[in-house]
């Protein structure tokens, strides 16, 4: 008798349509295999495939009453493992120290080679390649090196979704405009960020002053935030270079992520105590309050904002908020935004009325 899940030898009377229907059913999750069949498949495959089909792999998946498992997740597991192995081998070529890390210079080399491997990236203008490599490498360093050691563990890089974003550009088929716009590594996104940098550089000296950064489009940021960014980031004669600007953009655009919140927490932690309290909240919110008044909005009392933040975070210490408190509270993005971005604060403070307004507008559109 055939093992459960293993296909029966095709009979001469069986038509191609029937074979196609059977295959479709199998890939829909109907095909199953027991351990004996699993071992038979392993013995039929080349020896180098055996590590994909260890007993522990079979036992990892849920079994039915007959002890069989679905074939589809086993196949998907093999594809996934193969993908990880390919990534490890690829990245290993750039690990010149053999320590399991890629330094910034190693990442530069990796991204430079990816330009040649990608049908999309290979069309970049030569004059822009240096800026593209810088843009791509900052993404890896920002998210995978939050401790700012200047290197990324290959193990972390392999499992990161951002690596898949870059490798997706190897595809021969064209990506949609929406896919390109949402991919940090696409030429579309990279040129947009670089264009913003050039737009802010009013004096054309290739660097940004604090006053120039204040004109950042996409948020109404406070002078307090920008001042602290310039105190924390590396500057050259008091001005910011493109790399520091990329870190800033990644932090502002990804406030829901842990690395972005860690970046902003360092900004809020004026006295470098590893925590923020009433003094820091008062200091940063005063600037948000001034912007609200300038834009014709009625601001709340600073004490009320301070109380609300502590109520949301619920820190272990009732008068100090650590980054660990903020991270565990799940409201890190909200707290950061309230203290550095006037538009974000306005949206939060008027969330109920804005929701009602949007609901009313949608209802009006339906009856129009």
Image (cartoon, rainbow, N blue to C red):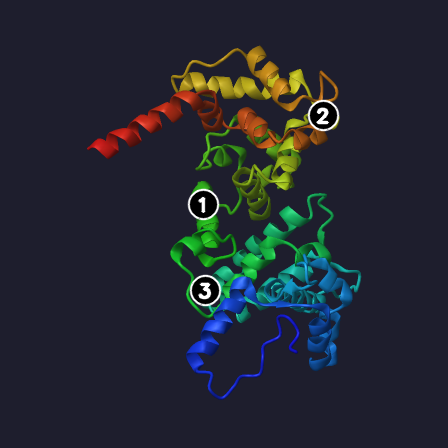
Q: Secondary structure at mark 1?
A: helix
Q: To which quarter of the image does residue 99 belong?
A: bottom right
Crowding at label 2, few (<14), some or many (≥20) Cα neighbours within 10 Å? many
Work out whether mark 1 precedes mark 3 in sequence or the reverse, and give the earlier one: 3
Is residue 295 shown to the viewer in this render?
A: yes
Decide which of 276, 256 is in the foreground and name it. 256
Residue where numbered disc 3 is placed: 125
Residue where numbered disc 1 is placed: 196
Q: Secondary structure at mark 2?
A: strand
Work out whether mark 3 precedes mark 2 in sequence or the reverse, and give the earlier one: 3
Q: Position of residue 235 (x, y in %)?
A: 62, 40
Q: Which quadrant is home to the N terminus?
A: bottom right
Q: To which quarter of the image does residue 154 belong?
A: bottom right
Seen at 34% across and 24% down, the residue is: 357
**In the image, is 68 to the left or to the right of 350?**
right
Crowding at label 1, few (<14), some or many (≥20) Cα neighbours within 10 Å? few
Crowding at label 3, few (<14), some or many (≥20) Cα neighbours within 10 Å? few
Disc 3 to disc 2, C-alpha distance: 45 Å
Decide which of 78, 59 is in the foreground and name it. 59
Disc 1 to disc 3, C-alpha distance: 18 Å
Seen at 45% across and 41% down, the residue is: 200
Q: Secondary structure at mark 3?
A: loop
Residue where numbered disc 2 is placed: 275
Is residue 236 shown to the viewer in this render?
A: no
Above or below residue 244? Residue 305 is above
Work out whether mark 2 precedes mark 1 in sequence or the reverse, and give the earlier one: 1
């Amino acid at each position: 008798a055939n093992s459960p899940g293993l296909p029966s030898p095709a009979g001469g009377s069986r038509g191609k349509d029937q074979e196609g229907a059977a295959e479709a059913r199998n890939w829909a999750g109907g095909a199953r295999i027991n351990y004996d069949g699993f071992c038979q498949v392993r013995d039929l495959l080349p020896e180098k495939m055996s590590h994909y089909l260890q007993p522990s792999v079979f036992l990892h998946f849920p079994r039915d009453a007959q002890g069989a498992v679905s074939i589809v997740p086993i196949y998907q597991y093999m594809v996934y493992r193969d993908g990880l192995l390919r990534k490890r081998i690829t990245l290993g070529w750039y690990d010149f120290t053999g320590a399991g890390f890629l330094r910034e210079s190693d990442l530069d080399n990796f991204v430079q080679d990816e330009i040649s491997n990608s049908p999309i990236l290979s069309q970049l203008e030569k004059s822009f390649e240096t800026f593209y490599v810088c843009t791509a490498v900052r993404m890896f360093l920002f998210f995978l090196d939050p401790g700012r050691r200047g290197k990324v563990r290959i193990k972390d890089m392999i499992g990161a979704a951002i690596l898949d974003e870059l490798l997706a550009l190897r595809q021969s088929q064209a990506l949609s405009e929406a896919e390109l716009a949402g991919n940090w590594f696409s030429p579309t996104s990279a040129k947009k960020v670089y264009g913003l940098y050039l737009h802010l550089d009013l004096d054309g000296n290739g660097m940004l002053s604090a006053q120039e950064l204040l004109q950042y489009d996409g948020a109404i940021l406070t002078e307090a935030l920008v001042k602290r960014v310039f105190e924390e980031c590396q500057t050259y004669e008091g001005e910011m270079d493109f790399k520091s600007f990329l870190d800033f953009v990644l932090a502002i655009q990804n406030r829901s992520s842990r690395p972005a919140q860690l970046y902003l927490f360092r900004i809020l932690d004026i006295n470098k105590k590893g925590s923020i309290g009433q003094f820091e909240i008062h200091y940063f919110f005063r600037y948000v309050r001034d912007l609200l008044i300038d834009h014709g909005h009625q601001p709340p009392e600073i004490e009320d904002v301070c109380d609300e933040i502590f109520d949301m975070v619920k820190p272990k210490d009732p008068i100090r908020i650590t980054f660990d408190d903020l991270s565990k509270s799940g409201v890190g993005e909200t707290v950061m935004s309230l203290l550095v971005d006037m538009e974000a604060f306005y949206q939060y403070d008027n969330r109920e009325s804005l929701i009602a307004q949007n609901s009313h507008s949608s209802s009006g559109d339906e009856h129009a």
